[in-house]
Image (cartoon, rainbow, N blue to C red):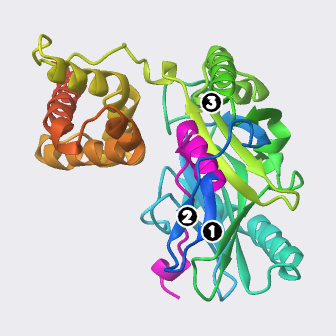
Amino acid sequence: MTNKEKFSKFTDIKQFRGIVKNIIHTADFNGYDENEKPIYIKHKFGSLPTLKFEFTTKIHGTNAGVSIDDEGNVFAMSRSRVLELTHDNAGFASFVEKNKDWFKHKLEMLNFHFNSKYPNFKVFLYGEWCGSGIQKNVAISQVSKKLVLFAVKLVNVDDNEDVYYLKIPKTIECPEREIYNIRKIGTTIIDIDFNKPEVAQNKLIEIVDEVEKECPVGKYFGVEGIGEGIVVSHYNKEGVRQHIFKVKGEEHAKNSGKVKVLKPVDEEFEQKKRDFVNDHGCKEWRLDQMYNETFDVINGGKGDIKKTGDYIRKVIKDVMKEEMDILILQGLTPKDVNSTISNVAKHYLFSRLDQESGL
């Protein structure tokens, strides 16, 4: 079995507006016509559901996964690849190797447990590898490295496309090995009425404000400091996740407010572009995150001016992935804002390189 065959990426997490859009889209669906094309009818006010969501604290670390291959060997994953001891990610492969007996036992137990209901499916465990030296500016960066598990994923071994995300059982933890369970640290249930999503949005903002003031995960481990945000999930009665979204604060990135863009402000269209970049596109947390990914900072990588193009392309790609609906809503196209995003990203990169070189 190759690394590519073993690897299974943890899902990208949407933003709240994406979930609202999906709920509305599902409510509008009214079957197919004679040509097998979907029919949509505008839903009536009050017809959208009220769903229970469970939120946990979002941990500012690096995504980590563990599973077993066909030969019974435990292997570790980052968000993008299977890890090797010689090609690690902030020491996570070494951590899994050290604790492989525990992981193997738990994964075999989970595979056996789910086999009756999900035959021919393979179990993956996911969590956040966090602690000192992995990220910065958050409470959790003050503690020793640890794994906080948050999800079980079942993958069909035949097609690798049929997947289920499940609530992680609270029994899956081992604090003496620095392996914790996010649901043991703390969860809270909230009701979201999708007929009035703005009410939930205001509540979510209040919750994130509190997390930023004092991170519940940091407090659990005995340290004070800010948190990153929250992850909010809806599960059906069988414990299968149906929806997931994130709400992030900006204090952890020391966001300084709106990004300054050197563009004329006396023309309506230019102002619209500037507002998009300031309010949605080039937030400092995004520029920081793309810098860390481009240069693999958590594994000792350093910024390099020769990779300016790689960094700019990564920023633009992430903006388009996360903010396309806002872009369209404001009557803009990627072509309208790409050069503006490029200029802001380049300015941030050069300033960061100067700062790190002591200039």
- Residue at the spot 77% in from the left edge and 71% down from the top edge: 107
Mark 2: give few (<14), some (14-19) or many (20+) Cα within 10 Å.
few
Q: Quadrant of residue 98?
A: bottom right
Where is residue 104 shown, x and y percent of the image?
76, 72
Q: Point out the residue furthest to the top here.
A: 266
The residues tagged by marks 1 and 2 sit, at their Cα atoms, a distance apart of 6 Å
**Relative to 54, 265 lies left or right:** left
Along the line of sight, the residue nearer the viewer: 111 or 25: 25
Query: How far across and how far down the image is residue 342, in percent?
Result: 17, 36
Q: Is residue 233 above or below residue 100?
A: above
The residue carrying pointer 1 sits among few (fewer than 14), some (14 to 19) or many (20 or more) residues within 10 Å by Cα, namely: few
The residue singled out by tag 3 in the image is 140
Q: Amino acid at mark 3?
A: Ile
> Are the residues flagged by discs 1 and 2 in contact, CB closer than 8 Å?
yes
Magenta-span inclusion, residue 96: no
Q: Which residues are magenta?
A: 1-27
Label 1: state its secondary structure.
strand
Could you say where residue 156 lies in the image, as x and y percent from the top left? 66, 81
Which of the pair 249/128 is nearer the observer?
249
Please tell me the numbered disc located at residue 31: 1
The answer to whether residue 292 of the structure is visible from this angle is no
Residue toward you, 326 or 184: 326
